[in-house]
């Protein structure tokens, strides 16, 4: 899909980061079980509780590098977050308290807006922490946010983890879909959600059509005109010769016949619509067939 920008985020922690189990004495140092409290440096009375993790993504180690499965040659920029040892940072937009600081390597919101980005597709891990906080912060910054669930992995997939995050997304107008449909990739249209229905994200101003698309439309229009010109017209009471009727400079206007309900069906294939004969057209051809039978 032709995204304007592709941004990768990664934790880039000091070896003594406050969220690491090795940074705390027992018994309050059990990864995934223990927690600790951090204060807002701008307002010490404001605090937040964060979970304790095993040491991870330490600066200067292989654990802080992007995994080889991600082709970083296709990534426009990588943002490092969590660089402040005394502050947790799940989102690349702001820290766990909600402040913007040099704990992130650059201001992501400003960078995206400078490039005219208005819609964000989010994937990654962990779903109920980094993905959740990134999506919520992006929404606060004024972006439309869509989470592609097949690209998300959570620590807790249950009601207290990812399912709770999805309820928060719904309340805040953040869309969650299983995947980007093929139609969306081609047209920027449908976004499939987990129930199989489709959400229509706002498209903003329509994109200019490419020269190739204009040629295809022109070619399709010419083919339709040729098809109409080549079609033999059946006259009531006269035997059809089977020869193509010569085109006249100006064809007489025909009275448009509105089909009754149930007489016309249509199918859309590749954006074009083909219309089978309705009952009125069949009635026009019927006298020609009767005249031919009478002559014989």
Image (spheres, rainbow, N blue to C red):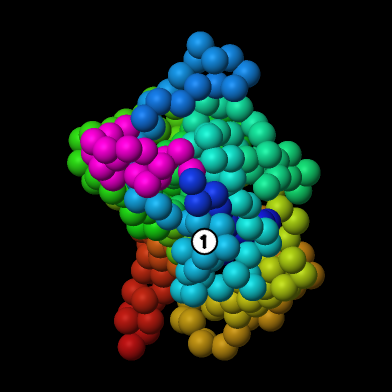
Judge whether residue 32 is colored magenta: yes
Q: Is 44 within the magenta? A: no
Left or right of residue 209: residue 153: left
Residue 104 on image: x %, y %: 63, 43
Toward the viewer: 238 or 232? Answer: 232
Q: Residue shown at 62%/18% (left/top)? A: 42
Q: Is residue 127 above or below residue 77?
A: above
Magenta stretch prevailing secondary structure? loop
Left or right of 41? Residue 54 is: left
Q: Quadrant of the N terminus?
A: bottom right
Q: Above or below — where is 85 with respect to 97?
A: below
Question: Which of the two residues, 137 or 253, is positioned nearer the viewer here?
Answer: 137
**Residue range highlighted in magenta:** 17-35
Q: Is residue 10 left or right of residue 141?
A: left
Q: Is residue 263 above or below residue 132?
A: below
Q: Residue at x 35, y 44 (%)?
A: 21
Q: Is residue 159 visible?
A: yes
Q: Which residue is mark 1?
A: 64
Q: Quadrant of the C terminus?
A: bottom left
């Amino acid at each position: 899909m032709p995204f304007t920008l592709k941004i990768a985020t990664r934790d880039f922690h000091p070896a003594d980061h406050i969220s690491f189990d090795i940074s705390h004495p027992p018994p309050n140092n059990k990864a995934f079980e223990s927690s600790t409290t951090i204060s807002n440096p701008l307002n010490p009375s404001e605090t937040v509780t964060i979970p304790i993790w095993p040491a991870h993504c330490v600066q200067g180690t292989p654990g802080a590098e992007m995994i080889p499965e991600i082709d970083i040659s296709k990534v426009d920029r990588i943002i490092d977050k969590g660089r402040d040892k005394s502050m947790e940072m799940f989102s690349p937009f702001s820290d766990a308290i909600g402040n913007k600081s040099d704990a992130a390597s650059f201001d992501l919101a400003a960078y995206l807006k400078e490039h005219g980005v208005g819609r964000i597709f989010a994937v990654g891990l962990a779903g109920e922490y980094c993905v959740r906080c990134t999506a919520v912060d992006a929404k606060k910054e004024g972006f439309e946010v869509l989470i592609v669930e097949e690209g998300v992995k959570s620590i807790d997939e249950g009601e207290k983890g990812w399912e709770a995050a999805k309820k928060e997304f719904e309340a805040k107008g953040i869309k969650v879909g299983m995947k980007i449909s093929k139609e969306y990739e081609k047209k920027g249209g449908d976004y499939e959600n987990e129930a199989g229905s489709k959400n229509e994200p706002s498209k903003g101003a329509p994109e200019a059509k490419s020269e190739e698309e204009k040629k295809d439309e022109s070619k399709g229009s010419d083919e339709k005109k040729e098809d109409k010109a080549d079609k033999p017209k059946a006259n009531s009471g006269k035997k059809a010769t089977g020869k193509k009727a010569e085109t006249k400079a100006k064809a007489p206007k025909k009275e448009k016949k509105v089909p009754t309900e149930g007489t016309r069906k249509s199918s859309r294939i590749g954006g074009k619509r083909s219309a089978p004969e309705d009952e009125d057209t069949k009635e026009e051809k019927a006298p020609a067939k009767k005249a031919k039978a009478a002559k014989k």
